[in-house]
Image (cartoon, grey):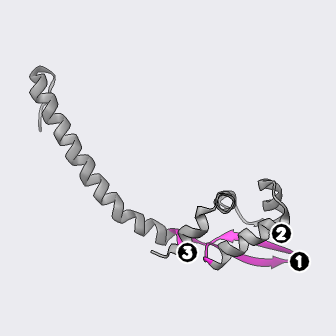
Amino acid sequence: MNTTILTALAEPNRLRIVEYLREGPRSVGEIATRLQIRQPQASKHLRVLSDAGIVHVRPVAQQRVYQLQAKPFEELDSWLETFRKVWEDRLDTLDAYLQELKTQTDPDEAEPKP
C-alpha cells in the first residue's frame, strides 16, 4: 500500500476536496469557494493530491481543472480488502459464539440450525 495516498487523505481539507471532486471535475476557484478557503491554500492542497496521484490537472483556457484518478482508490480498496476477510471471519466467529450462548441460556428461543 502506498502510504502517500493515506497521508494525503489524512488532512481534512484534502479529504473534503476529494469528496467534492466525486461530483465531477472542478476548477481551483470552485474548490476554494466550496471549501471556503483562499485559492492559494486550495492550490497547495491540490498539489499534494496531485503528487500522490489522487487527482489529475488539465488546463482549460485560463483555469486549471482537477479531477479524481481511479488508480489510487483501486489500490486503497485492494488494501482494505485484506482487512475485510479478517473482520468477516471474526464476526462469523462472534455470531456463532452468541448463537451458542443463546441456545445455552434459553433453548426454546434458539433458532433452528440448518
Q: Is residue 61 visible?
A: yes
Q: Nearer the viewer, mark 2 or mark 1?
A: 2
* Residue 52 at x, y percent in the picture: 61, 76
Q: Which residues are magenta?
A: 52-73
At x 30% / y 59%, what residue is drawn? Answer: 85
* Residue 29 at x, y percent in the picture: 84, 64
Question: Closer to the N terminus: mark 3 or mark 2?
Answer: 3
* Residue 100 at x, y percent in the picture: 13, 35
Name the residue beneath numbered marker 1: 61
Question: Judging from the image, what secondary structure is the residue with disc 3 in?
Answer: helix
At x 23% / y 47%, what residue is drawn? Answer: 92
Q: Disc 2 residue type?
A: Pro
Q: Is residue 71 visible?
A: no
- Do the CB atoms of the residues marked 3 and 2 lie less than 8 Å apart? no
Question: Callout 3: 10 Å neighbours few (<14), some, many (20+)?
Answer: some
Question: Callout 2: 10 Å neighbours few (<14), some, many (20+)?
Answer: few
- Do the CB atoms of the residues marked 1 and 3 lie less than 8 Å apart? no
Q: Is residue 74 magenta?
A: no
How far apart in space, not on screen, are marks 3 and 2 (Cα)?
22 Å
For residue 26, side relative to residue 8 (left or right): right
Name the residue beneath numbered marker 2: 40
Q: Quadrant of the N terminus?
A: bottom left
How far apart in space, not on screen, are marks 1 and 3 (Cα)?
31 Å
